Amino acid sequence: MRHLMSPLDFTTEELDQLFDLANDIEHNKGKYAHACDGKILATCFYEPSTRTRLSFESAMTRLGGRVIGFSDAASSSASKGESVSDTIRVISCYADICAMRHPKEGAPMVAMERSLIPVINAGDGGHQHPTQTLTDLLTIRSLKGTLGGFTIGLCGDLKFGRTVHSLIHALVRYDNIRFIFISPDELKVPDYITEMLKSKNIPYEEVMSLEDVMPRLDLLYMTRVQKERFFNEEDYIRLKDFYVLDMAKMTLAKPDMLVLHPLPRVNEISVEVDNDPRAAYFKQAQYGVYVRMALILTLLELV
Amino acid sequence: MLNVGKIEEGFVLDHIKAGYSLSVYEHLGLDKLDCTVAIIKNARSEKMGKKDILKVECDINMLNLDVLAYIDHNITVNVIKDGEIVDKRVLVLPRQIKNVIHCHNPRCITSIEQELPHIFYLADPEKKIYRCKYCEEKYTESAKKRF
């Protein structure tokens, strides 16, 4: 039985198979409409999430399966003090596969260790968000045609932004990737990531100015400064609008640069950018459903 | 000078930092074993000024001493058989340590999940860096002191 805790759980060859399946689903939806008939997905979401939860629910529903679950800790037995270990043992009796989001880092791993069904990490605190990474990789591969040989700028909250951490871990396995980390000092990428890049001799830069590096980027991954990750509201207010991508900055970019964003956005991408053909973030949301469909099929061993 | 008799088979753990012998005793799980243990605190040492020593009489295959490398790699491990030192064991950093240090990341699941062991894995043997298995928080010296 396989689980998904980190994007590194799959080899690059396995990821290629997963993305081939996702692209096949994209072009042949009818073929998979009953692939999960009789199967149940449990969405155990201990913190609010609209997009990820609905994306999972959409994926399972489009495969013909059903969905049970809860969407915040208050409506689950966690509010009565039940441990993650106990909850997953019970959920294992009710469902065939589980997607878990939890504000505490490592919670899905605890679930995985006790579970009788495949567990998917749907985001654990500021740590990992592997299905977003699969979404990002599928989007890049589908729109750029390859997963190597580019310079990617990651901009915004690189400290608490789990999508960023997961994406970096996944991209280092491909050839000729250069990272440019664009953030204020307070939100710099954690040291364990820069240590990992150094140990693998992967080039990276840490800068504060988005404008200065725009012309060099093949991909720009924008992130939201997340209020829920701050203990101190003053820090959040000071940093939340540090970067705003607008058309003036887009004029500095290459004509084929792609703008990605895990969504939801707040102010970090101006609405005027939405009409630019380089804005790929809504397509990214669509790819998120296809890749979750492919993942569910793979973990349930239905392909 | 206090004299403690020779042991026939077991270990003499020498050059333990003064005051740390009880911590070593606990980490080796000696409190759970039915064997003779002598704890010598604040023994005079030319090299260290003061040091602690542990003498453990037991089957030499009975104890896993890996954790000592994590606690203090300067500890000397003398292996005793038939009353003589037969080996001086080189300490190797364990790949994983369980419930030796605690994760202090308030966002880690170990902060709320009861009964969950605190497991750290060796992320960088050269720099002796350990990270929490669950949240990847880096071990720091302050965590060790708190322990």
Image (cartoon, rainbow, N blue to C red):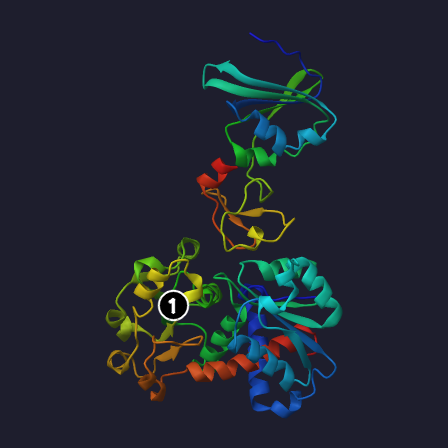
**Within the image, what quadrant is residue A210 found in?**
bottom left
Q: Residue at x 38, y 65 (%)?
A: A157
* Residue at point 68%, 32% (across, down): B63
Mark 1 sits on what residue? A225
Answer yes or no: is residue A100 visible: no
Secondary element type, mark 1? loop
Looking at the rendered image, the quarter that the C terminus of chain A falls into is bottom right
Residue type highlighted by circle 1: Val
Residue A215 position in % (x across, y down): 26, 75
Q: Residue at x 35, y 67 (%)?
A: A156
Residue A248 in view: yes
Residue A135: x percent and y percent?
A: 51, 76
Question: Where's the N terminus of chain A, which quadrant?
Answer: bottom right
Say which quarter of the image contains residue A168.
bottom left
Q: Is residue B70 left or right of residue A89?
A: left
Q: Tell me residue B88's x, y (percent).
A: 59, 25
- Residue A222: where, in percent of width, then height? 37, 73
